């Protein structure tokens, strides 16, 4: 379940105040696509190219707006959801203060009664008669907090999350005695860092497609590449060692993969040949070589290990069975595979030059740890007592999912649900 495309023309000029999505959620950094549309396009499903052309034509025909901004006013995903919510505020004439940062929680008579904030360079006090709801995300943009709580190595640059999620509200509540939990966990996923882009890109579909493998510095596979993305990063950390470094890992694929599938910021080679992306090669983002030995030298992995891993993969592709990591055996694995490839849509031989590689880092969509709350979204002290007047929702609260990950939407679903619960509880609804 996900939002349909939203007609952002309804927001007027306020659309420009909506933060743009991660570039990977937009084809060519411009076109909004739903998850279903992205799967159709990236895995070569029938109708995928026709769909892409329709979206591109709709973008180009928005002529008046093209003179104003490159932003697509037919957004999907998070921009569609937030656009709809913003429109609801506008319909109800509810003011929205931008660039107003909370600095301190106000406590009166043992109850949280408002916040001290900074707006337009001035310090203001905002009173709250019913309660304060914290919904400011996690701490993925705060390198110091990452170093303190998350597994190492860790870098804010590897995150796909909002860089302005810097954890201050978590620390504000902790000063009042609030408890925290799951601070060493996150909504993990392998990421790729593209030069010049503010956010890392999540490797979701790419890693499941045939003719590719993920290897460590020894050139060895260490996990099922098509597994849920949270499992990939857990494996990267669990198996990372001085003898077998897995951070970063290297995503390796061949010329046929490059021709048929998108990867990171690149369209499939049939639509965007290498010469059209020469800047990314010059910057060292993507490595390209005529042989596996040459590629191994370029990325600094053991050549014999890489060639042995490729040889095993090619045999698995022939039989359709991966006895090491069972790649392509589950419905989840196969969802992002190439259905045209048999006998296993996630396995294909890596045997056609040139060969390519990009670095893969242990990134995340956002941190999972935060303030402990109860079923009413009330923030709890370390002793488990509710702090009167204080609520927390979303990624600034410890995830209701614990250390599990039932699937995509495990962040936004609880955030919206507990937002509703918190508002009802605060107002006595």
Image: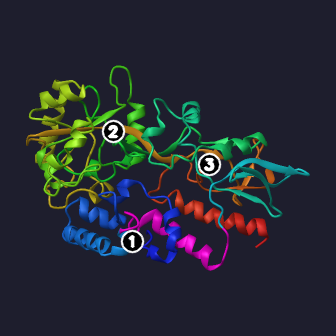
Task: Please tell me the numbered disc located at residue 184.
Answer: none
- The stretch of residues the image draws in magenta is 67-95
Task: Name the spot of residue 16 as percent of width and height, x first.
Answer: 49, 64
Q: Which residue is label 2 attached to?
A: 360
Local packing at callout 1 (Cα closer than 10 Å; few below 14, some 14-19, many 20+) is some
Indicate whether 27 appears above or below 253: below
Q: Residue furthest bottom?
A: 91
Q: Which residue is mark 3?
A: 398
Mark with earlier residue (1, 2): 1
Q: In the rendered structure, which disc, 3 or 2, sits on the residue that comes first in sequence?
A: 2
Label 2 SS = strand
Quarter of the image for residue 171 reads top right
Alpha-carbon neighbours of circle 2 within 10 Å: few (<14), some, or many (≥20)? many
Gap in angstroms between the C-alphas marked 3 and 2: 27 Å
In-front residue for pair 181/150? 150
- Image quarter hosting the N terminus: bottom left
Q: Nearer the viewer, residue 285 or 290?
A: 285
Secondary structure of the residue carrying numbered label 1:
helix
């Amino acid at each position: 379940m996900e939002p349909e495309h939203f007609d952002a023309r309804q927001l007027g000029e306020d659309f420009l105040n909506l933060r743009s999505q991660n570039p990977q959620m937009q084809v060519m950094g411009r076109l909004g696509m739903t998850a279903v549309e992205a799967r159709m396009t990236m895995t070569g499903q029938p109708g995928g190219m026709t769909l892409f052309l329709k979206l591109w034509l709709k973008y180009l025909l928005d002529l008046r707006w093209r003179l104003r901004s490159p932003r697509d006013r037919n957004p999907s995903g998070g921009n569609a959801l937030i656009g709809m919510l913003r429109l609801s505020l506008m319909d109800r004439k509810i003011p929205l203060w931008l660039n107003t940062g909370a600095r301190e929680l106000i406590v009166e008579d043992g109850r949280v009664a408002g916040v001290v904030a900074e707006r337009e360079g001035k310090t203001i006090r905002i009173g709250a008669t019913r309660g304060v709801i914290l919904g400011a995300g996690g701490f993925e943009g705060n390198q110091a907090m990452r170093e303190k709580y998350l597994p190492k190595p860790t870098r804010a640059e590897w995150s796909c999350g909002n860089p302005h999620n810097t954890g201050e509200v978590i620390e504000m509540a902790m000063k009042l005695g609030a408890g925290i939990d799951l601070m060493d966990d996150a909504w993990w996923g392998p990421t790729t860092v593209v030069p010049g882009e503010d956010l890392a890109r999540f490797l979701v579909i790419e890693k499941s497609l045939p003719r590719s493998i993920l290897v460590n510095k020894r050139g060895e596979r260490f996990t099922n590449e098509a597994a849920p993305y949270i499992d990939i990063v857990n494996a990267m950390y669990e198996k990372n060692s001085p003898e077998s470094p897995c951070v970063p890992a290297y995503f390796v694929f061949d010329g046929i993969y490059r021709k048929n599938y998108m990867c990171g910021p690149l369209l499939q080679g049939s639509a965007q040949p290498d010469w059209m992306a020469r800047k990314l090669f010059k910057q060292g983002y993507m490595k390209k070589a005529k042989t596996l030995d040459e590629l191994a030298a370029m990325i600094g992995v053991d050549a014999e290990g890489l060639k042995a891993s490729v040889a095993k993969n090619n045999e698995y592709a022939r039989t359709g069975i991966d006895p090491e990591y069972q790649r392509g055996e589950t419905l989840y694995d196969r969802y992002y595979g190439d259905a045209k490839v048999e006998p296993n849509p996630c396995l294909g031989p890596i045997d056609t030059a040139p060969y390519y590689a990009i670095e893969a880092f242990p990134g995340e969509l956002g941190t999972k740890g935060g303030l402990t709350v109860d079923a009413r979204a009330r923030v709890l002290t370390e002793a488990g007592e509710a702090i009167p007047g204080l609520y927390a929702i979303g990624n600034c609260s410890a995830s209701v999912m614990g250390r599990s990950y039932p699937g995509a939407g495990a962040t936004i679903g609880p955030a919206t649900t507990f937002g509703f619960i918190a508002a009802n509880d605060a107002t006595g609804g």
